[in-house]
Structure formats: C-alpha cells, structure tokens
Amino acid sequence: MSITMGLLKELERIQKENKRRCTIINKATVHTLLKEGEKVIGCIYKNKDGKDLTEYGPVVICTGGYGADYTEDSLLKK
C-alpha cells in the first residue's frame, strides 16, 4: 500500500504542476480503445455520471481498483 500511495502522490504532483501532462480519471469504465492501425491513440469511457467522454493520447488502463472502494455496492462490501 505504501508503494501505491507513493506513486499516486507523485502522479498527483505531476498533474498539479502541469495539467496537460497527465489526466487522472477515477470511477470510469473504458468501453472503446481508439486506434490508428495497431496503435492505441485514446479511449472512450463512461464516467461516474454515465456520460461517454473521449480522451486522446497514451492510455494506461489500471484494473483491480476495488481495494479502495468503500461504497455501498463495492466488491469489498459484497
């Protein structure tokens, strides 16, 4: 957990320093990868409000984030 928190803190610092350098998106579901040939150039995702949004640029997909989800319908709660 300390490694994860350290990485997250650094990523948040980078984003705060330069908002164009990275975007942190939580509680989203990616449903389409945008590609040019075999290269991924972005994604379309559904945000927590159910709205489809598009992001272009490098995509890092992180899964298994249920470990910090303490909502009523979380996997941890179930």
Image: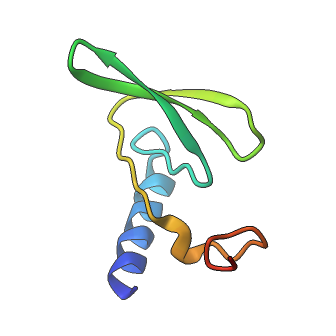
Q: From the viewer's perspective, is residue 35 above or below residue 45?
A: above
Specify the color scheme.
Answer: rainbow
Q: Is residue 71 left or right of residue 38?
A: right
Which quarter of the rendered picture does the C terminus lie within? bottom right
Q: Residue furthest bottom?
A: 2
Q: Residue furthest front?
A: 78
Who's the residue at 40% across and 55% down the image?
62
Q: Residue furthest left?
A: 38
Who's the residue at 49% across and 45% down the image?
23
Who's the residue at 46% across and 53% down the image?
15
Who's the residue at 57% across and 43% down the image?
29
Q: Is residue 52 left or right of residue 12?
A: right
Q: Position of residue 49 (x, y in %)?
A: 78, 42
Which quarter of the rendered picture does the N terminus lie within? bottom left
In front of the other: 38 or 24: 38
Q: From the viewer's perspective, is residue 4 above or below residue 31?
A: below
